[in-house]
Amino acid sequence: MEKITLASQLLQYLITGLTVGSVYAMVAVGFNIIYNVTEIINFAQGEFVMLGGLIMVFMNVAMGLPLILAFLATIILVTLVGILMDRLAIRPIRRPSVLTLIIATIAVSILIKGTASFIWGKDPFDLPAFSGRNPITFLGAVVQPQYFWVIGFLIVTAVALSIFFDRTIIGKAMSACADNPNAASLVGINVKQMILLSFALSAAIGAVAGITVTPISLMEYDRGAMLAVKGFGAAILGGLGSFPGAILGGLIMGSIESFGAGLISSGYKDAFALIVLLVILFFKPSGLLGSIEISRIKRF
């Protein structure tokens, strides 16, 4: 009986970890999309997730829009925020260095957080679960239906991005900019437009992560910073610039966090995954699936 109970607990931790890790993975993918084109670490990525959750609450709960319409409207609005970020905070900088652009993303993060605090206040907000909150029992573990939505959207995102970058002309153009922006420009690719698209895609994916996780863990104005730290950690763990690595890193980070909180102490749950990250990077600095090559700074 004790073995069955222990097995159920371990399964519970695994399911919870994969769910949380799916959110980290989507944040990490957002980091990689922008990094691959610009080599910028966008520290406002977590704010896209926060905006996705809070705007969805406003659209679905406050305005009463149906779930699908609220979902689409939220993604569009957060995508516009990403576009404005590129047009107003990134592109106007003359002779940009990577460090200058990273500082610009930090400034945007602070601005978005302050604006969200002014609009929504400091209280956390809840969002109705997409399929209700009646739990499902599986081998002794309790599974919320929303968990399937979170993991499912990660799978959809991964498949859609794979098709986009491998099968479409625009996706291949973005990949070309990531490899060599000067050469891409010489063959007629508008590098600035590709950078704009990378911010739009990154914001949209962040919005999806925020929308799907809010029914599970609520959302408030200052959640973005910690989500950015966890997502960036997942990107580094998997290998910065690697999309499969970002997904793997996110799932590992979430699982370690869940098992650490359940088996040791929930008070240190934010530290467990980061400690493992440091240990892995000590032995493999490029990350689990990252390249050991050091790419040069891209200019645009």
Image (cartoon, helix red, strand yellow):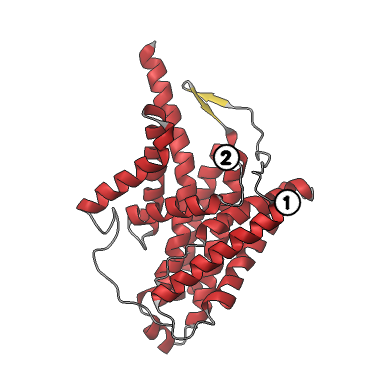
- Mark sitting on residue 217: 2
Q: Residue reaching furthest top? A: 1
Residue sitting at 46 percent across and 87 percent down? 188
In the rendered structure, the answer to whether residue 220 lies left or right of residue 36 reads: right
Q: Nearer the viewer, residue 84 or 75?
A: 84
Q: Nearer the viewer, residue 142 or 222?
A: 222
Quarter of the N terminus within the rendering: top left
Q: Is 12 situated above or below 56?
A: above
In the rendered structure, the answer to whether residue 180 lies left or right of residue 226 reads: left
Answer with mark 1 or mark 2, whichever residue precedes in sequence. 1
Q: Residue reaching furthest right? A: 63
Residue sitting at 49 percent across and 51 percent down? 227
Q: Is residue 158 visible?
A: no
Q: Residue reaching furthest bottom? A: 186
Residue that mark 1 sits on: 58
Is mark 1 in CB contact (under 8 Å) with mark 2?
no
Image spot of residue 18 (x, y percent): 44, 40
Which corner quadrant of the image does residue 113 belong to? bottom right
Residue sitting at 48 percent across and 50 percent down? 226
Measured Cα–Cα span from mark 1 to mark 2: 17 Å
Residue sitting at 59 percent across and 27 percent down? 135
**Mark 2 secondary-structure assignment:** helix
Residue type pointed to by label 2: Ser
Image spot of residue 200 (x, y percent): 56, 67
